[in-house]
Image (tube, helix red, strand yellow):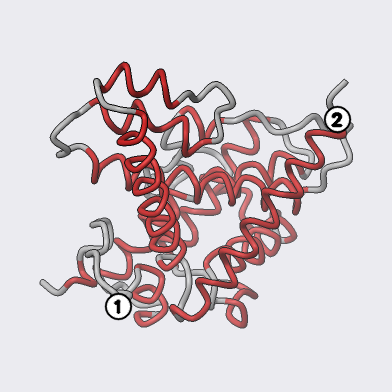
Amino acid sequence: MTESEHPAAAPPRSRRFPTTRWSVVRAAGATTSPGSRAALESLCATYWSPVHAFVRRSGRSDDEASDLTQAFFTRVIEKGDFGNARDTLGRFRTFLLTAVRHFLSNQADYDHAAKRGGGHVHVPLGPSSDEDARPVPDPASDETPESIFEQRWALTVIDTAMARLERESAGADDPRLFETLRPFLTGDEGASYADAARVLQKTEGTVRVAVHRLRRRFGQCLRETLADTVDDPADVAAELSYLLDVLARRHRTSSLNQP
């Protein structure tokens, strides 16, 4: 098998971007290519949360949003139904948002699929972790479905990159290294070089170097994760800028809402 036929595997560490999973989907179009289906199914499972948040914020109950999200992804995967999203397939993020809007606007056509297992093959999708199950803000807030989608998308990308880095770190000489230094990646205000040095039995200087290296590798994992969702590697920088802007806006909104 070629590298592109193994979409779930982490990309090799090289200066060149490998063929990305979304590129595999785009190349295969609406065909039933095993590589295309596996790639799309993997992406849909990973990014279930932003779509669910969008549907929930659009006024559906949590249970209804789960059913509709399942129906949406089942249709995308089983039927290759890209709807009106064909002009925006360059970025998987844009495809999802455009396609789910189209899906909801034509909900009446898909009511038979809104019930779990309603005559269709059930695609095993859903939150991949407790982090993906973050509550959606109350409908009384000023957040729009689009802004909630953007925030959840950004957090999902961060979580996916972190998971990729964690898998890489599993074979480290000291298995405590990643978990001890993780707070320095997540911006935990309680992260202490002195405490980390005591746990790892290293000097603070050594810990600072290790954190610097881990942060640099996390940045690479973040770019690799974004590369999985665009057609052209040249778009990664723009997607990273977008993600950072979304997170900055989220932080400003959270600060304003704090008592």
Q: Residue drawn 41% across and 70% down?
A: 22
> In terms of sequence position, does the residue under pointer 1 or pointer 2 come before the other?
1
Q: What type is the residue that disc 1 sits on?
A: Arg
Where is 198 relative to 28, above or below? above
Where is 36 relative to 254, above or below? below
Instruction: Bin the neighbour count of mark 1 within 10 Å (Cα to Cα): few under 14, some 14-19, many 20 and up.
Output: few
Residue in the foreground of this view, choosing between 49 and 100: 49
Callout 1 secondary element: loop
Task: Give the labeled residue for mark 2.
Answer: 257
Q: Residue drawn 55% across and 28% down?
A: 188
- Kindly report the distance in space between the C-alpha atoms of the residues bearing marks 1 and 2: 43 Å
Q: What type is the residue that disc 2 sits on?
A: Asn
Residue in the foreground of this view, choosing between 251 and 51: 251
Tell me if 204 is positioned left or right of 134 in this view. Answer: left
Residue in the foreground of this view, choosing between 125 and 141: 141
Q: Which mark is residue 16?
A: 1
Q: Which mark is residue 138?
A: none
The quadrant of the image that shows the N terminus is: bottom left
